[in-house]
Image: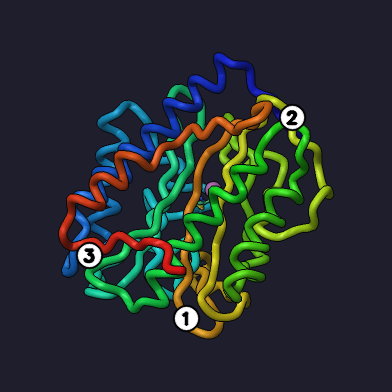
Amino acid sequence: MVKIKTDDQVELMRKSALLVSKTLTEIAGILKPGVATLRLDEIIGAFIRDHNAVPSFLNYNGYPFNSCISVNDVVVHGFPNESELKDGDIVSIDVGVILDKWHGDHAYTFAIGEPAPEVQQLVAVTKESLYKGIEKATTGHRIGDIGFAIQDYTEKAHGYGVVRELVGHGLGQKMHEDPQVPNYGKRGTGMKLQNGMVLAIEPMINLGKKEVFTESDGWTVRTKDGKPSVHFEHDVCIRQGKADVLSNYAAIEEAEQKNPELFVCTLKA
Ligand code: MF3
Ligand code: CO
């Protein structure tokens, strides 16, 4: 069942989404080679609690950390650990909060040092694909239009692998609400989008093949071919004509540009 949010509820959700954006901005400022991802997770947990919120991933179906930190061939749900980021890595940081009963859940992939050009392009194309999906997140379109737009741009135009096993989702007082939001699909199919629906749209795109597997820890999802994977996620409210993006990359991107240890990946022709 899909829960339509009132305007007041959407404003509360914007606060939750923006707290995630703020947390990711903090992390963007301190990312560098040599930092252990578990340190980042500790900072994420403390920052969220300092802002009167709760890290929603912690204990979700037994998930044991504040955040998911997914390096290189880890697609999503990577465990923060003592291994250190190094020059050329890409790292998806996925953060969720509950603030005043409402969930925010979004993610950004950063490039450490200077990744290979093909990896830079994967990062840029995946981010762009999120916006291709968001363009379709308007009243009257269907769920399949979002997935089609993402798949068409990443798989058809760039030859990347679109992960099938994991999808975006509705968001509200629960982290995962209906509907599911696949990053693949057929135009004009699936549930009709309505004003006030809030969706987490989250392309997970592989440089190589689409196939993934889950490690024996029960969480860590990796590409089968060992090639890198990129993940971006925004929280979006369906509106007539133009989606209202509740999360915000502007401050994250500013911090990314200011941090000399990070590479800003831009689209190459
Ligand atoms: N952003 C992810 C999701 O939407 C992360 C949640 S996994 C968790 O599904 F277990 F860590 F919470
Ligand atoms: Co999500």
Which residue is identified by label 2? 194
Q: Is residue 197 above or below residue 118?
A: above
Task: Kindly identify the amino acid type of the residue bearing the numbered disc 1.
Answer: Lys
Q: Earlier in the sequence, mark 2 or mark 1?
A: 2
Q: Position of residue 255 (x, y in %)?
A: 23, 46
Task: Residue lying at the far top in this picture: please name it.
Answer: 8
- As drawn, the label of residue 36 is 3
Left-right relation of 95 to 177: left
Between disc 3 and disc 2, the foreground one is 2
Q: Is residue 140 above or below residue 73?
A: above
Residue nearer the viewer, 224 or 256 = 256
Where residue 204 sits, quadrant-wise, is bottom right
Q: Position of residue 173 (x, y in %)?
A: 58, 29
Q: Is residue 207 above or below residue 170?
A: below
- As drawn, the label of residue 141 is none
Q: Residues within 10 Å of mark 1 (few under 14, many from 20)?
A: some
Left-right relation of 40 to 267: left
Assign a secondary structure to mark 2. Answer: loop
- Residue 52 visible in rendering: yes
Q: Residue at x 26, y 44 (%)?
A: 254
Q: Position of residue 88 (x, y in %)?
A: 28, 75
Q: CA distance from mark 3 to mark 1?
A: 22 Å
Q: Residue at x 47, y 54 (%)?
A: 232
Q: Residues within 10 Å of mark 3 (few under 14, many from 20)?
A: some
Q: Residue at x 15, y 59 (%)?
A: 260
Which residue is identified by label 1? 227
